[in-house]
């Protein structure tokens, strides 16, 4: 059974997967367009990091970065988040690992009261499966967010997180 749980980006098998992720990002995108985080950056307090495992075997990882609150929304600030470092091992592709990780991150963001989730991914064909995954889960293209700027090698996507009306 695949389980998604908090984990340490410095754990040896996770470190290896993240190193492969970074290598692939630099192999498929111009260096100035690589926005993937390294192992130490994923340990920052503003980032929650999870892995997907089956009987201890690493299948994938993903992270949620707290972007803080949307400017101009005080006193009812709206929290924003960014999905980072979604990666599935080669042997686990096609098993629903990415879908499970994405659903977990979205659920956590909703539980934390995030108003909106963002992500950045590449425009190259290599990233087409990721773009399709995000689109299937309701993400749509948007302008650059946070500190990002327009970049022909980047696609920016967002997902508004709707909350059920509270009972009266």
Image: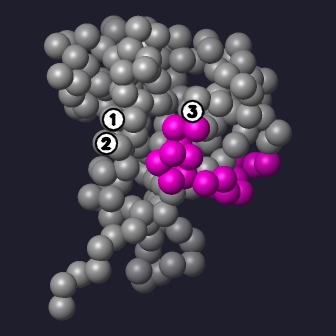
Query: Which residue ends up furthest to the bottom in the rendered image?
Result: 168
Q: Quadrant of the C terminus?
A: bottom left
Label disc, if present, on residue 104 of the rendered structure: 2
Report the residue marked by disc 3. 130
Q: Position of residue 97 (x, y in %)?
A: 36, 26
Q: Which residues are magenta?
A: 132-150
- Comes first in the chain, label 1 or label 3: 1
Q: Residues within 10 Å of mark 1 (few under 14, many from 20)?
A: some
Numbered circle sitting on residue 145: none
Residue annotated with mark 1? 100
The answer to which quarter of the image holds residue 6 is: top left
Q: Camera-side residue: 14 or 122?
A: 122
| Tag 1 near tag 2, CB within 8 Å | yes
Task: Say whether residue 1 is visible.
Answer: yes
Specify whether residue 134 is painted magenta.
yes
Q: With respect to residue 86, does 80 lie above or below? A: below
């Amino acid at each position: 059974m695949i389980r998604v749980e908090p984990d340490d980006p410095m754990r040896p098998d996770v470190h290896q997967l993240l190193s492969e992720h970074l290598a692939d990002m630099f192999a498929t995108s111009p260096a100035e367009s690589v926005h993937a985080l390294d192992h130490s950056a994923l340990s920052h307090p503003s980032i929650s990091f999870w892995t997907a495992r089956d009987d201890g075997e690493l299948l994938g990882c993903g992270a949620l970065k707290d972007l803080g609150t949307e400017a101009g929304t005080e006193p009812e600030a709206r929290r924003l988040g960014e999905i980072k470092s979604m990666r599935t091992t080669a042997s686990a592709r096609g098993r629903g690992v990415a879908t499970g990780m994405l659903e977990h991150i979205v659920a956590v963001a909703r539980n934390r009261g995030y108003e909106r989730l963002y992500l950045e991914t590449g425009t190259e064909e290599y990233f087409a499966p990721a773009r399709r995954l995000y689109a299937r889960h309701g993400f749509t293209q948007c302008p650059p967010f946070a500190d990002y700027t327009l970049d022909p090698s980047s696609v920016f996507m967002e997902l508004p997180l709707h909350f059920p009306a509270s009972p009266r």
